[in-house]
Image (cartoon, helix red, strand yellow):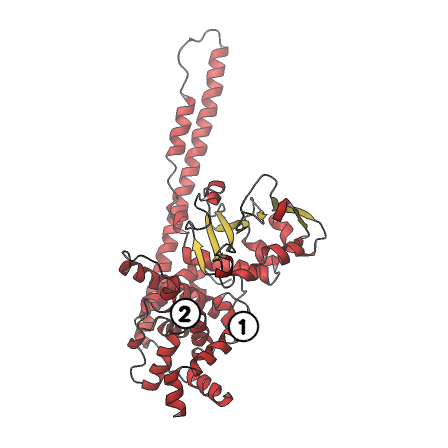
Amino acid sequence: MQNQREIISNWFNLYSQDVFNFLVYYSGTVDVEDLVQEVFIKAARGLSTYRNQSTPKTWLFSIARNLAIDKAKKKETKFSQTSIAFQEEALNQHVGFSPEQILIDHEEKQVLYRKINQQKKKYREVLILRGIQGLSVSETAQVLGCKETAVRTNYHRAIKALQNEPNWRESHEG
Amino acid sequence: MKDNQKNVEENLNEFPSYRMSQPTQDLLHQQIMDTLENSNVRQKRQGVVLMKAKIGIVTAVAVVIVSILSINLLNDNPNSSSGENPIPIDQDVDQEVEQTPVDEEDNNLYDPVLLKEQAIEILQAIHNRNLDVLSSHVHTEKGLLVSPNFSVMDDTVRFEKNELPTLIDSDTTYLWGYGEANTEIQLTPADYFDTHLQVERFFESDEVFVDTQNQEVDPSNYLKTVFPDSKIVEFYRAGTEQYSGMDWKSLNLVFEQDEEGAWRLVAIVNNLFTP
């Protein structure tokens, strides 16, 4: 039987670039090496609770997503300790993410990426996981901890929402 | 329109991949391995300290037993001097117990992100009716309490860990609790899962609280008083405007540490508005 370090080392070699790429798009910055490191350390510590229900890759993505959300929340809390209302929805959608930091050399993609970041959280997540990362419906459901039907519905609606964005239509139909 | 949809999807697929440079990747790998190595060494040291503490306690207890026997023997002996205070037995034992080191490593095992992951895995397992997986998360000694209301009493339904894998096929009817108008909730496990537990409702929770009191629905922190040493993951769905927010729901997964310090499920408690 492989020990904890061997398993994590193996997973790191197989999936660290995927986790990095996912975190870049999820957080909107390329400065995510620390988070990648934290993902694998947490995975090692939680290995005893891993039940092979999800693949190692989707399990790592799921840890990465929760870490990124936590980090964004902490960042937000620092800045909004004096604010009156805690806007969870707004927080989940944008705060803590700085999309302008990436896709600098891909102007058209950057426009689309901004639109993605303006969508509801559940749309944004399926667009990044299904659309940009190319995960299957089942894999996306494993990462998000939701039903496959929810992934299908949200993805379909998210794509529609993007199509209806005025800037997107203008640049592709005009 | 279809073409447009394809266009959007194609565009998403063509987003560039970001990759770490090889030296960065190597450095991260090394740092992760070093961290894991260090924590392994710490755990081993902790194990040695604990073992020493256990040996200490066993020795102390042995000394106390021998002392009691000796005192009894001396007291039984008419030639011995009597009336003197015996050795303060209780005090000695207490001192030894107090000297047991605090198990810091166990406290460190609590990680909110991992506990949330574990809770999500449990929801998935229940959704898939994969009770083998559910059972693997349950506390071996304490079993699993299941309550449809926000109350845990002596008669709350409880299952042993080894009962769970076959539970879904059981025809036995249990009294899980009381519903509207004080009607009894008497159902088989399969029916209870379908009609009351309904984990699917919590896949899209508005908030997941990990060991954080939800002031909205539990200002008195009731579950913590029932399970003082627990960590609780609460999946919360806020109420809708249609019902003035009264239709909120939450599902609480209660975890306690087992002998090895791992967090194991001990209770699944639903909660919803009660007038």
Q: Position of residue A46 (x, y in %)?
A: 45, 58
Q: Residues within 10 Å of mark 2 (few under 14, many from 20)?
A: many
Q: Position of residue B242 (x, y in %)?
A: 51, 61
Rendered view: A39 above or below B104: below
* Residue at the limit of the structure toward the top, as seen here: B79
Label 2 to label 1: alpha-carbon separation: 22 Å
**Quadrant in the rendering for residue A103:** bottom left
Using residue A55 as the reference point, say whether residue B109 is left or right of it.
Answer: left
Which chain does the numbered disc 2 sit on? A
Q: Residues within 10 Å of mark 1 (few under 14, many from 20)?
A: some
Q: Identity of the amino acid at label 2? A: Phe
Reading the image, the residue beneath label 1 is: A138
Q: Is residue A173 visible?
A: yes
> In the rendered structure, are the residues bearing label 2 and label 1 in contact, judged by CB atoms less than 8 Å apart?
no
Instruction: Looking at the picture, tell me which residue is in the foreground, B238 or A152.
Output: B238
Q: Position of residue B142 (x, y in %)?
A: 56, 44
Reading the image, the residue beneath label 2 is: A12
Q: Identity of the amino acid at label 1? A: Ser
**Disc 1 secondary structure class:** helix
Question: Measuring 32% from the left and 64% from the top, which residue is drawn there?
Answer: B31
Instruction: Looking at the picture, tell me which residue is in the foreground, B143 or A49.
Output: B143
Mark 2, mark 1: which one is toward the viewer? Answer: 1
**Disc 2 secondary structure class:** helix
Instruction: Looking at the picture, tell me which residue is in the foreground, B92 or A32.
Output: A32
The tag on residue B46 is none
